[in-house]
Amino acid sequence: QAKASGKDKTVFFNAGIGGQLSRKMELEKDLRLALEHGQFFIVYQPKWDARRGKEAGFEALLRWRHPEKGVVSPGEFIPIAEETGLIVPMTRWMLGEVCRLNKRWHDEGKFKVCISVNMSYRVFESMTIFDMVDEALRSSGLPGPMLELEITESIAMKNMTITLSQLQRVRDLGVQVSMDDFGTGHSSLGRLDEIPVDTLKIDQSFVKSSDLASKQALIVGIIGIARLLDLEVVAEGVETAEQAEFLLSRGCILMQGYYYGRPMLPEEVEAGAWRIDSAPSHTVRAD
Ligand code: C2E
Ligand code: MG
Ligand code: MG
Ligand code: MG
């Protein structure tokens, strides 16, 4: 009797909350096997140098091809991977793959650029970042400066002592660090000078509304902070020529967004069809 009612409860619980939770629970179950079943793949989005008219790097973004549900977006599965701790082995796999690919591109003379990998707080918390990065660099033979870690302000602020010491060790390997989604997280502005980063990435939300004077002021402010702290600045989510023109006119020359290239498979990146000659560039501007 007790068993039967327990079973009923489970059914009621699932149905009562609706499809949302049961999909999440299914994804959580399936995510545990996704790595060993080879269901993850990585896409690469260019970061474009509008002054030189060539790629300045790529960002590696994780994709999950679910056997029944199709491609699940990271917005949906990364939070689950973080909750369950699966993000740690996933990040280790990702670093290995990215370093191997970039070493090949480097050796074949295809691209000599840095590729970035997004980091989750859970990876810092696990205290394994240094070992993971060191292992990925060693086994691939990729030089440290050709790998970049993207962190967020929230990561940097969460447990500053732990995070900063780990970041410092990784940077001693020559690895680059960038601050993702800058301006949207737990504000790190007051201590930005203490965080070992090389680059600020202007969040897409600012770029999206860059026709508004108020957002323009914030973008100009971020570019100014980057310049004063001697950091690089990359604009994220650039979708139109107008947005690119505005950013260029304010001195931001590193661009990332659909206008310059969508996240692509390595073969597509290599084929080079995404390269644009018509994009606004710094050198051809009148002013
Ligand atoms: P993010 O690191 O800020 O990555 C940028 C996101 O914006 C990517 O979405 C990218 O496809 C999208 N994007 C790029 N250009 C444009 C544009 O012009 N317009 C619009 N509307 N979107 C653009 P994606 O790949 O879905 O990733 C979402 C987030 O998931 C990432 O945000 C990152 O926080 C997380 N993520 C993705 N892969 C990984 C990973 O391997 N590890 C961890 N920890 N997080 C990851
Ligand atoms: Mg990122
Ligand atoms: Mg971002
Ligand atoms: Mg963003």
Image (spheres, rainbow, N blue to C red):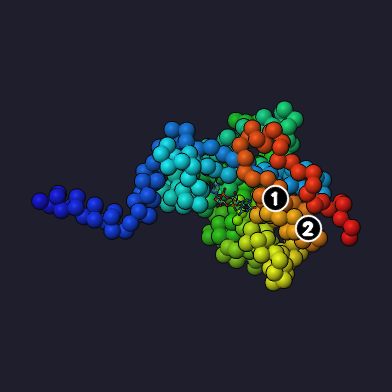
Q: Counting other residues with Cα less than 10 Å from the Cα at mark 2, is it few (<14), some (14-19), or many (20 or more)?
A: some
Residue under the image location 74 percent in, 41 percent down: 275
Q: Is residue 276 visible?
A: yes
Label number found at residue 125: none
Toward the viewer: 243 or 64? Answer: 243
Residue under the image location 36 percent in, 43 percent down: 29
- Give the residue at mark 2: 245
- Image location of residue 238, percent across then percent down: 69, 54
Label 1 near ligand 1 (CB < 8 Å): yes
- Image location of residue 228, percent across then percent down: 77, 62
- Give the residue at mark 1: 259
Q: Quadrant of residue 236?
A: bottom right
Q: Is 67 placed left or right of 56 in the picture?
A: left
Q: Which type of secondary structure does the marked residue at label 2 adopt?
A: helix
| Mark before the other along the chain sequence, 2 or 1 | 2
Q: Is 249 placed left or right of 130 in the picture?
A: right
Question: Relative to residue 157, is residue 83 depicted above or below?
Answer: above
